[in-house]
Image (cartoon, rainbow, N blue to C red):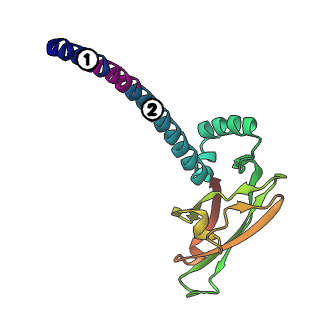
């Protein structure tokens, strides 16, 4: 009789062990699936966060701008504009410096014009200073280099924004100044 009881107990233990093993396998599959879904969601959130924090840089790249325009069309959002065709450099002048040493320095004054009906990101500016003997100097200015307010990133629609910079070249040595906007 003890042997029969022992045999029945062994069978019960084996049945319980196999059902516990099956439950563990089901739970591990479900937990692995949930981890996979969680990882995909966190990766998607990371991409969205990167895009939001770098939107001004991404819009300046033509390939990224096309993709972002498609996404914004679906989500009904708007992107900052970065169209060079809508920008115009005007009123380029140079004079003896009124700020620094007038014999050795020159003030360059110009305006960046936004010709579009929408806000526009401020461009970088490439300034080429030509003298009697050819190219005297070449400068590249980022918006934070020529704007008074560093956090200002967009020009108002149909606006004109003047800027001035002083360079260490005598005004008499300058024959022409070319300013080209770029992103």
The residue sitting at 35% across, 26% down in the picture is 24
Give the answer, above or below, for where 4 lies relative to 136.
above
The residue pinned by badge 1 equals 14
Circle 2 Cα neighbour tier, 10 Å, few/some/many (<14 / 14–19 / ≥20): few
Q: Which of these two is toward me, 3 or 9?
A: 3
The residue sitting at 60% across, 78% down in the picture is 106
Q: Does the magenta stretch include residue 2?
A: no
Disc 1 and disc 2 in contact, CB within 8 angstroms? no
Q: Report whether 89 appears left or right of 151.
A: right
Q: Which of these two is toward me, 158 or 92?
A: 158
Range shown magenta? 17-26
Give the answer, above or below, for where 88 lies relative to 10.
below
| Residue 55 point in image, percent of width and height | 62, 50
Disc sitting over residue 36 in the figure: 2
Q: How many labels does the image show?
A: 2
Q: Which of these two is toward me, 49 or 85?
A: 49
Q: On the rendered image, what quadrant is the N terminus found in?
A: top left
Q: Is residue 23 magenta?
A: yes
The answer to which image quadrant residue 33 occupies is: top left
The residue sitting at 65% across, 73% down in the picture is 149
Could you tell me which secondary element the residue under label 1 belongs to?
helix
Give the answer, above or below, for where 71 lies relative to 181.
above
| Residue 141 point in image, percent of width and height | 57, 63
């Amino acid at each position: 009789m003890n042997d029969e009881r022992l045999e029945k107990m062994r069978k019960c233990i084996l049945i319980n062990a196999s059902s516990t093993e099956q439950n563990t396998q089901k739970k591990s599959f479900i937990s692995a699936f949930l981890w996979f879904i969680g990882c995909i969601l966190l990766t998607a959130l990371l991409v969205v966060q990167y895009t939001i924090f770098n939107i001004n840089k991404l819009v300046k790249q033509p390939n990224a701008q096309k993709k972002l325009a498609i996404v914004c069309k679906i989500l009904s959002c708007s992107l900052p504009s970065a169209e060079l065709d809508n920008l115009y450099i005007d009123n380029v002048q140079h004079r003896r410096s009124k700020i620094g040493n007038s014999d050795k320095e020159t003030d360059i004054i110009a305006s960046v014009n936004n010709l579009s009906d929408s806000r526009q990101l401020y461009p970088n500016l490439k300034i080429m200073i030509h003298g009697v003997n050819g190219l005297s100097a070449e400068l590249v200015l980022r918006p934070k280099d020529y704007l008074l307010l560093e956090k200002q990133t967009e020009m108002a629609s149909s606006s004109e924004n003047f800027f001035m910079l002083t360079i260490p070249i005598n005004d008499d040595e300058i024959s022409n100044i070319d300013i080209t906007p770029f992103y």
